[in-house]
């Protein structure tokens, strides 16, 4: 299965993904949030096998056979989404731009509505400079507006639970089953339809939960609705669009009631977060979103759980503004981080919004942890050297994809002053220290490693505000942070290391 299909899966696997499954509802609610059609399990299996078969054929340069496999998908699912998508990928990967555009046009004509997927798919890299590509992206945006138009009605309200459960465990079991069913089916739907189904199911599930917890004074049904909508989109990606409006409207509905101070604080914060991500980085309206977010953040009182995160998000939005005073905003963010050490909400907003770019504002950050040989690691150990600090894990495909670059750079530049410290986010229950040592020895990673088996709970992950991996940072000979992120990926890694070494 190629990267395009993997990313197609990832698009819908962010957040909490739940879906409707066979429950009754009123006629009005059916008209507003009609669930997509579920395919038979045997069809799902057939399509999955055909996709794998098609890309296997492409890997062997057998275009005709790959196209035949994808054509069978279009016969099984005649909605023009899955077969056409992979056929377009096949032609793009083999250099036939004209046929790739023929099938991309068919795809969009059929209602395909995921512009982010289309724009970010590396299989279409050779098409992006063609004048025909951007208009297709624009049309997918129009398709999404149409497919998700029912979101304007807001999150449904079910006064009576549409299904009864005796215990919360029963409800959760059922919800997990529906989630699994969704994961097997989502690739056959328009993204707008899938989003509508998620919103509808969240409303249904919460109405059932409200019934189960009717005697629990700690259960805040209105706030849970706000939280459910805020989880619909990934906090790592901007361009929430209509989902931001959903979150804001639901937060306002909640705030018009009689929320507790803690609930009021969180609702304003969730609304501000959604507004911060409403528009993409390329959208001029983003600044207005930041302005509206600032108004909400100013309503998060000091002393509440989200106060530190509110201050951090305010600083981050300043950093992201086109006319940002980077030094002033960065110093402001550093002050917030220092004021709220160990605050989980601060870590969450910083690690998702600017990730390891945060290190530049709070540097220096001490390592001071023992390596797998129980020898202490400290920045002071590397004075006069160039040090690559690399957060990674054996379970991380992008990390493993980058490993050949890291190995090559280490082999070439270690004799000239490059050192590496890898910090593993592996899980102790899956990778023992002995298994980890065997893995790195087999891979030729002959440098120092820090591994405590705590994965994302590793203290250094929190200290460096790591939100995704691989997360490389490069420390210069004088101990200053000189590079991070994309400057240390792929071919850029060797160029950046060579510059830091001064050769």
Image: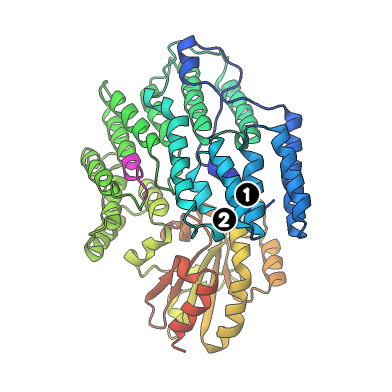
- Tell me which colouring the rendered structure shows: rainbow
Q: Secondary structure at mark 1?
A: helix
Residue 352 at x, y = what percent?
Answer: 42, 51
Which residue does the image show at 34% across and 27% down from the upper left? 250
Query: Would residue 149 be visible to someone looking at this image?
Result: yes
| Closer-to-camera residue (426/86) | 86
| Closer-to-camera residue (428/495) | 495
Q: Crowding near pointer 2: few (<14 within 10 Å), some, many (20+)? A: many
Give the side of residue 307 with respect to residue 55, left or right.
left
Give the side of residue 348 with respect to residue 332, left or right.
right
State how far apart marks 2 and 1 are (Cα).
8 Å
Residue 62 higher or lower than 494, as above or below? above
Residue 120 at x, y = what percent?
Answer: 51, 53
Specify the label residue 124 is tagged with. Answer: 2
Going from the N terminus, do you reach mark 2 or mark 1 first? 1
Marks 2 and 1 close (CB-CB < 8 Å): yes
Residue 406 higher or lower than 62, as above or below? below
Which residue does the image show at 59% across and 60% down from the upper left? 398
Specify the label residue 158 is tagged with. Answer: none
Q: Which residues are magenta?
A: 273-280
Q: How many marks?
A: 2
**Residue receiving disc 1:** 88
| Closer-to-camera residue (239/396) | 239
Q: Crowding near pointer 1: few (<14 within 10 Å), some, many (20+)? A: many
Which residue does the image show at 70% across and 62% down from the upper left? 435
Residue 54 at x, y = what percent?
Answer: 74, 49
Q: Quadrant of residue 240?
A: top left
Q: Is residue 254 magenta?
A: no
| Closer-to-camera residue (231/143) | 143
Give the side of residue 371 with respect to residue 465, left or right.
right
Residue 261 higher or lower than 55, as above or below? above
């Amino acid at each position: 299965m190629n990267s395009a299909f993997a990313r197609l899966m990832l698009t819908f696997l962010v957040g909490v993904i739940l879906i409707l499954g066979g429950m009754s509802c009123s006629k009005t609610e059916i008209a507003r949030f009609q669930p997509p059609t579920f395919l038979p399990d045997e069809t799902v299996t057939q399509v999955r096998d055909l996709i794998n078969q098609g890309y296997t054929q492409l890997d062997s340069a057998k275009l005709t056979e790959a196209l035949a496999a994808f054509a069978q998908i279009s016969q099984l699912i005649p909605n023009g989404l899955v077969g056409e998508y992979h056929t377009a990928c096949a032609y793009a990967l083999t250099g036939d731009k004209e046929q790739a555009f023929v099938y991309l046009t068919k795809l969009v004509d059929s209602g395909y509505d995921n512009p982010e997927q289309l724009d970010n798919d590396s299989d279409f890299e050779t098409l992006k400079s063609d004048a025909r590509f951007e208009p297709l992206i624009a049309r997918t945006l129009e398709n999404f507006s149409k497919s998700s138009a029912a979101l304007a009605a807001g999150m449904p309200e079910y006064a009576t639970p549409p299904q009864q459960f005796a215990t919360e465990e029963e409800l959760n079991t059922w919800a997990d089953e529906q989630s699994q069913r969704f994961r097997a089916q989502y690739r056959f739907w328009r993204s707008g339809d899938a989003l509508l189904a998620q919103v509808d199911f969240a409303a249904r599930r919460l109405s059932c939960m409200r019934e189960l917890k009717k005697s629990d004074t700690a259960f805040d049904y209105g706030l849970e609705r706000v939280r459910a909508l805020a989880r619909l989109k990934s906090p790592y990606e901007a361009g929430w669009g209509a989902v931001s409006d959903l979150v804001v409207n639901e937060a306002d509905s909640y705030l018009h009631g009689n929320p507790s101070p803690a609930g009021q604080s969180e609702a304003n914060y969730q609304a501000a977060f959604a507004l911060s991500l409403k528009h993409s980085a390329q959208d001029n309206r983003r600044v207005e979103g930041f302005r509206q977010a600032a108004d909400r953040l100013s309503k998060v009182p000091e002393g509440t759980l989200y106060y530190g995160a509110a201050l951090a998000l305010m600083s981050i939005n300043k950093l992201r503004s086109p006319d940002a005073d980077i030094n002033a905003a960065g110093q402001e963010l550093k002050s917030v981080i220092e004021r709220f050490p160990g605050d989980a909400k601060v870590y969450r907003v910083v690690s998702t919004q600017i990730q390891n770019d945060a290190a530049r504002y709070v540097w220096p950050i001490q390592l001071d942890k023992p390596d797998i040989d129980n020898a202490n690691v400290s920045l002071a150990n590397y004075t006069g050297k160039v040090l690559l600090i690399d957060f990674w894990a054996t379970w991380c495909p992008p990390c493993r994809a980058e490993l050949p670059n890291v190995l090559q750079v280490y082999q070439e530049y270690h004799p000239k002053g490059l050192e590496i410290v890898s910090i593993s986010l592996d899980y102790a229950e899956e990778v023992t220290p002995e298994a980890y040592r065997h893995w790195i020895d087999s891979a030729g990673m002959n440098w120092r490693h820090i591994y405590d088996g705590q994965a994302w709970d590793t203290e250094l992950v929190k200290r460096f505000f790591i939100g995704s991996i691989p997360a490389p940072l490069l420390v210069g000979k004088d101990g200053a942070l000189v590079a991070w992120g994309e400057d240390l990926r792929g071919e850029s890694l060797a160029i950046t290391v060579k510059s830091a070494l001064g050769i």
